[in-house]
Image (cartoon, grey):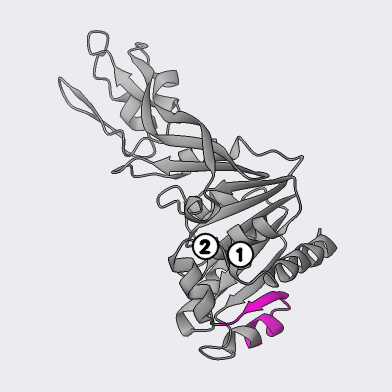
């Protein structure tokens, strides 16, 4: 079973929920940190990294001795990653989506694909939890190719927890795509509700069953709960604003280590999820 944890905005407690859910379940758990631009689950899980692999994408390289500057590669590139002038061809790797169209359709066979490293994939173990994380290189424009490569390590024989990036754009869609269930983490504020509504639209488009966890539930207003009731969205859990939780978070200590009674609450979430699965 693949459970992704997402949120429409950063700072709602998405990683807190993902990490503590993984720690609360029985053995046979795999954790994927797909927030590759700013992975931070390792701060709490403290995994022993056993293997590190470079992650790369294919980008075009033009052999100008063969090139006739016909402009066919520019025409087929939907992302404007190639510019053709009278006596030169410019390739913009940051815009390339590695589709291979320019290589396939070049009349002179003057283009080949070369690898460009975009980040690393780290594989390790945190007690009984199998850990996989991606880390995007600084200045890289697109994180979805790395997220795709991280997800290749999904082990469907385990309960898989995916910590998705914040927001509702392509990296989030790539992270939660293929999940059996999605947990949306929000907070009871106008900003939190606005971004929750956007995220609900995304998971409904993807046809992924989902439920909501309200973090810092005793702050703000009750409009988030009213919205969930109106839209018939199950509220899986409410986490109160707690100084103990905040202090443990600042120290990199999981909530369930400080407040062990929460293990039972997170275990109950899995029971609720299985009713929809």
User: Which residue in the rendered view is the most extreme toward the right?
Assistant: 275
Is 260 drawn above or below residue 140 in the view shown?
below
Q: Position of residue 276 (x, y in %)?
A: 81, 63
Q: Are marks 1 and 2 in contact (CB under 8 Å)?
A: yes
How far apart are labels 1 and 2 at the CA level? 7 Å
The one of 92 and 34 positioned closer to us in this rendering? 34
Q: Secondary structure at mark 2?
A: loop
Name which quarter of the figure residue 200 lies in.
Answer: bottom right
The C terminus lies in quadrant: bottom right
Is 222 drawn above or below residue 177 in the view shown?
below
User: Which residue in the rendered view is the most extreme toward the left?
Assistant: 87
Give the number of the disc on residue 253: 2
Q: Residues within 10 Å of mark 2 (few under 14, many from 20)?
A: some
Task: Judge whether residue 188 can be spotted in this image.
Answer: yes
Q: Residue at x 56, y 38 (%)?
A: 124
In reply to whether residue 201 is colored magenta, the answer given is: no
Task: Judge whether residue 9 can be spotted in this image.
Answer: no
The one of 113 and 277 positioned closer to us in this rendering? 277
In reply to whether residue 229 is colored magenta, the answer given is: yes
Name which quarter of the figure residue 204 lies in.
Answer: bottom right
Q: Residues within 10 Å of mark 1 (few under 14, many from 20)?
A: some
Q: Residue at x 56, y 41 (%)?
A: 132
Name which quarter of the figure residue 213 lies in.
Answer: bottom right
Is 83 drawn above or below residue 29 in the view shown?
above
127 horizontally vs 58: left or right? right
Q: Position of residue 236 (x, y in %)?
A: 71, 73
207 horizontally vs 93: left or right? right
Give the number of the disc on residue 61: none
Is 204 drawn above or below residue 29 in the view shown?
below
According to the picture, the residue beneath numbered tag 1 turns out to be 257
Please provide the residue range marked out in magenta. 226-240
Q: How many marks?
A: 2
């Amino acid at each position: 079973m693949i459970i992704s944890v997402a949120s429409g905005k950063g700072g709602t407690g998405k990683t807190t929920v993902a990490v503590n859910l993984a720690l609360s379940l029985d053995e046979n758990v795999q954790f994927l940190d797909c927030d590759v631009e700013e992975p931070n689950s390792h701060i709490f899980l403290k995994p022993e990294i056993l293997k590190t692999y470079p992650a790369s994408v294919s980008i075009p390289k033009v052999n100008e001795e063969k090139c006739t500057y016909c402009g066919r590669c520019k025409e087929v590139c939907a992302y404007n990653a190639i510019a053709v002038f009278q006596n030169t061809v410019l390739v913009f790797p940051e815009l390339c989506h590695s589709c291979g169209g320019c290589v396939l359709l070049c009349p002179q066979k003057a283009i080949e694909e070369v690898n460009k490293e975009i980040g690393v994939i780290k594989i390790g173990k945190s007690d009984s939890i199998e850990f996989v994380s991606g880390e995007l290189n600084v200045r890289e424009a697109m994180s979805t190719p790395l997220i795709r490569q991280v997800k290749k390590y999904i082990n469907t024989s385990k309960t898989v927890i995916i910590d998705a990036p914040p927001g509702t754009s392509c990296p989030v869609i790539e992270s939660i795509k293929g999940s059996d269930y999605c947990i949306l983490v929000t907070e009871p504020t106008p900003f939190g509700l606005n971004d929750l509504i956007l995220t609900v639209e995304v998971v409904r488009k993807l046809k992924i069953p989902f439920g909501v966890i309200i973090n810092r539930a005793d702050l703000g207003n009750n409009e988030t709960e009213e919205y969930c009731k109106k839209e018939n969205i199950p509220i899986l859990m409410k986490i109160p604003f707690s100084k103990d939780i905040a202090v443990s978070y600042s120290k990199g200590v999981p909530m369930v280590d400080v407040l062990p009674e929460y293990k039972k609450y997170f275990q109950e979430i899995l029971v609720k999820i299985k009713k929809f699965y």
